[in-house]
Amino acid sequence: MPTALPTSADATAAVFLWGDALIRIAIIVLVTLILLRIVHLLARRVQRRLAAAEADQQQLLRVQTVLQTTRSMIDVVIILLAVFMILYALGINVVPLLAGASVAGLAISLGAQTLMKDYIAGTLILLDDVYHVGDAIEIGSVKGRVERVTLRTTYVRSDDNSVLHIVPNGEVRVVANHRAPSRSA
């Protein structure tokens, strides 16, 4: 069986198709980088305005944590969209990938329930102003001073400074806060 060799017209068409795809990919990468830069600049601007407006350092730390988490989530969404657009520009059908990603996302979400519970509880702890860094607290059998609060965990140093307890925020049910009451006139 004789096989037909590609003609120069076929080769020229392939070069134009790949050239077109490369131009599209370059535009997608450029727009992605611009969007990421805009998101980071807006986050910095909001952070500076809050720093100027907020007198309470703890309130500022809480807002910064929520702002940083939101910025990270927006970054992930922008990058994922760019990846799917690049794959589409290369001629790869992204519909099966999206279907597979949704099934994988479901499996990951089922496996990451406690992680999500920790993040949601951490957000509520920060927003509800339950405790601050430096407060003397009791969470279940853990007693001590709060050293650090993140969206996922709370770090509590025992009163004798010998043990650092790392408590997942999803496990925080009842908190005894021994913070001195604020004096509001």
Image (spheres, helix red, strand yellow):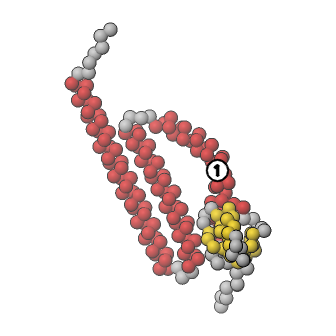
User: Is 185 left, or right, of 72 in this rendering?
Assistant: right
Residue 39 position within the rendered picture, expressed as x and y whole percent measured from the top left: 43, 61
| Screen quadrant of the C terminus | bottom right
Work out whether 117 lies above or below 51.
Answer: above
- The residue indicated by pointer 1 is 112
**Residue occupying the point 70% across, 81% down:** 179
Give residue 78's position: percent from left, percent from top: 45, 52
Task: Residue at the far bottom: name it.
Answer: 185
Q: Residue drawn at (70%, 73%), measured in percent from left and top?
A: 162
Q: Quadrant of residue 116?
A: bottom right
Q: Judge from the rendering whether residue 154 lies leftward or rightward of residue 27; answer left or right.
A: right
Element assignment for label 1 = loop
Q: Amino acid at mark 1?
A: Ala
Above-or-below relation of 103 to 180: above
Residue 40 location (% of width, % of height)? 42, 63
Residue appearing at x 28%, y 30% in the figure: 14
Height in image: 26 above or below 8? below
In the image, residue 17 lies at what x, y percent?
A: 29, 34
The reply to whether residue 130 is visible in this rendering is: no
The N terminus - image quarter? top left
Dot 1 crowding, Cα within 10 Å, few <14, some 14–19, many 20+: few
Q: Is residue 88 visible?
A: yes
Residue that lies at the very extreme toward the top in this rendered image: 1
Q: Residue at x 52, y 61 (%)?
A: 70
